[in-house]
Amino acid sequence: MDIRRTSKRISSVLRHRPDSVGITLAPDGWVPVPTLLAALHLTREQLGRVVAENDKQRFTIERTPDGERIRANQGHSVTVDLGYEPQDPPGTLFHGTADRNLAAIREQGLVKGRRHHVHLSPDPDTARTVGGRHVRPVVLTIDAGRMARDGHTFFRSANGVWLIDAVPPQYVTG
């Protein structure tokens, strides 16, 4: 089993296309583990490896009285309410992107596109890893402290990714 490919497949299903394998997410994004396993033809051991070894920690598995359930931590394009509470961010956050996006970012800032939020990293190395999927990655610095003081609301996902609706250009450097 290719961990990376399987992780991307699970991500696609839990974030964007649950219908592609005939499953329905709960309003808060959860799906019973046995349902996902059957839909993707995976074993519980294979799923455990993907969740444990995924470098981005994209998923959370939770035990409930009815069994186990799983959801993606963030990045959804389908409607879900992850229930994250607003949090005060650190003074600086980071965003990894491709250099070809810089002109648009300088003009419009960071926008969420089809996703629920813009994703920000707590440190430049993580942002560089995220941006590394592009040919020429760039790490941008976000003045999160000033944004919070100016009334912008931040959330923090279960895997430490900071989430916000948008980052206006005046808060972006790099």
Image: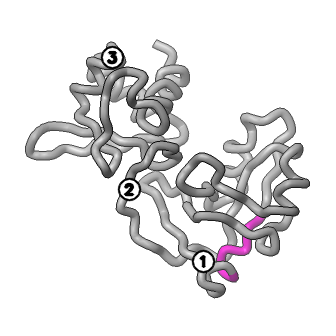
In the rendered image, the vertical position of residue 96 relative to residue 106, given as above or below: above
In the rendered image, the vertical position of residue 53 relative to residue 114, given as above or below: above
**Does the residue at mark 3 contact the one at mark 2 (Cβ under 8 Å)?**
no
Q: In which quarter of the view is residue 112 placed? A: bottom right
Q: Amino acid at mark 1?
A: His
Of the numbered discs in the image, which one, if any, rests on residue 80? none
Residue designated by label 1: 152
Image position, residue 94 (x, y; %): 70, 60
Q: Which of the two residues, 148 or 121, is positioned nearer the viewer here? A: 148
Residue designated by label 3: 42
Of the numbered discs in the image, which one, if any, rests on residue 82? 2
Image position, residue 86 (x, y; %): 45, 73
In this picture, which residue range is highlighted in magenta? 141-146
Q: How many marks?
A: 3
Q: Residue at x 51, y 16 (%)?
A: 2
Image position, residue 172 (x, y; %): 79, 67
Q: Amino acid at mark 2?
A: Leu
